Amino acid sequence: MSAETPTTRHHSRDWAWLAIVTGIAAALRFVHLGEWSFWADEIFTLRDARAFPTSLTMNPIPYACVAACIKLFGVSEWSVRLAPALAGVACAPLSHWAGRRLFSVWTGRAAALLVALSPWHLFWSQNARHYVFTFLFALVALVAFHEAMREGDVWWSAAALAATVAVGLSHTPAAAFVLGPVSFCAVKTFRRRGWATEGRRLRALLVYFAPMAAAGVVVGLTPALRAYVVAGWGRNARARSVPY
């Protein structure tokens, strides 16, 4: 039988670390999950989830997930918070993946532990709201866009597009995430060499930005869609401005 190589031992330790940290994240997020009663905003989540998809609302991804949990387990504080808790747990291994992919193994380990133990992340993982979904999809979009620009790969770019759309469908104002890629393009444009030798990156950027630009034009030219987006969650009596 062949001896275990250093690389194999390294991967084994990494998987063990990830399993432990993910277990910690899960334990913290599920302990006392249904102990306290709903607060005001969770009632809105419950209302919109129960009406979904008959009544189309903004932020459909969290409402669809909560609606599925309600259908499976009935209405309770625990069931309504189950989907955010699961998303919160998933953020720990995703942070490990992001840190490792962008920087190093130790960065990935530290990122996973930081997310698992973060009181603020824990707080929103135990609330029936949309913020942990936004965090999760933004993390995927960030890594995918980075890889698309590094490799000029249109598949990474398509993944970044899908994750960015999911960010906006989790919490509408968080679609401002796209300002990051826009800023990258602006900086790149004003550099001396610009895009002169970046054919593959340009194709990847086209895959990422063209569908969003087309959707923006459609929304801008359709009064009903424009009014719906500006109105915040689509049900508020007061419309919210674009800067909001």
Image: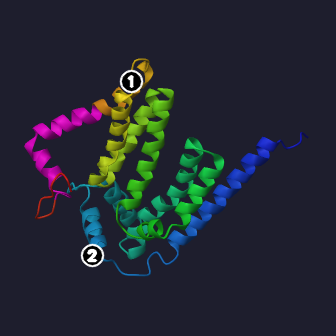
Residue matched to label 1: 194
Could you classify mark 1 by the number of other residues whose Cα lies within 10 Å: few (under 14), some (14-19), or many (20 or more)? few
Name the amino acid, label 2.
Ala
Residue furthest toward the front? 192
Q: In the drawing, does residue 65 fall left or right of residue 101?
A: left
4 is higher (above) or lower (below) than 81: above
Q: Secondary structure at mark 2?
A: helix
SS for tag 1?
A: loop
What residue sits 27% from the left and 53% below the top?
173
Assess whether residue 152 is covered by the magenta stretch.
no
Q: If you read the primary sequence from the N terminus, does the residue marked by circle 1 or circle 2 appear first?
A: 2
Count all numbered tags in the image, as a single digit.
Answer: 2
Horizontal side of residue 133 vs 24, given as left or right: left
Q: Nearer the viewer, residue 121 or 128?
A: 121
Q: Which residue bears the numbered disc 2?
A: 40
The residue located at (41%, 38%) in the rendering is 160
Quadrant the C terminus occupies: bottom left
Residue 51: image location, x then y, percent:
24, 62
Mark 2 Cα shell of 10 Å, populated few (<14), some (14-19), many (≥20): few
Determine the residue positioned at 56% across, 54% down. Answer: 93
**Span colored in magenta:** 211-234
Residue 32 place in picture, x, y as percent: 49, 78
Q: Position of residue 226 (x, y in %)?
A: 13, 46
> Residue sitting at 83 percent across and 41 percent down?
5
- Disc 1 marks a residue whose amino acid type is Gly
Q: Position of 43 compared to 147: left or right?
A: left
Mark 1 touches mark 2? (CB < 8 Å): no
The percent coordinates of residue 194 (x first, y second) are: 38, 24
- In the image, residue 148 above or below residue 39: above
Looking at the magenta stretch, what is its main secondary structure? helix
| Magenta stretch contains residue 229 | yes
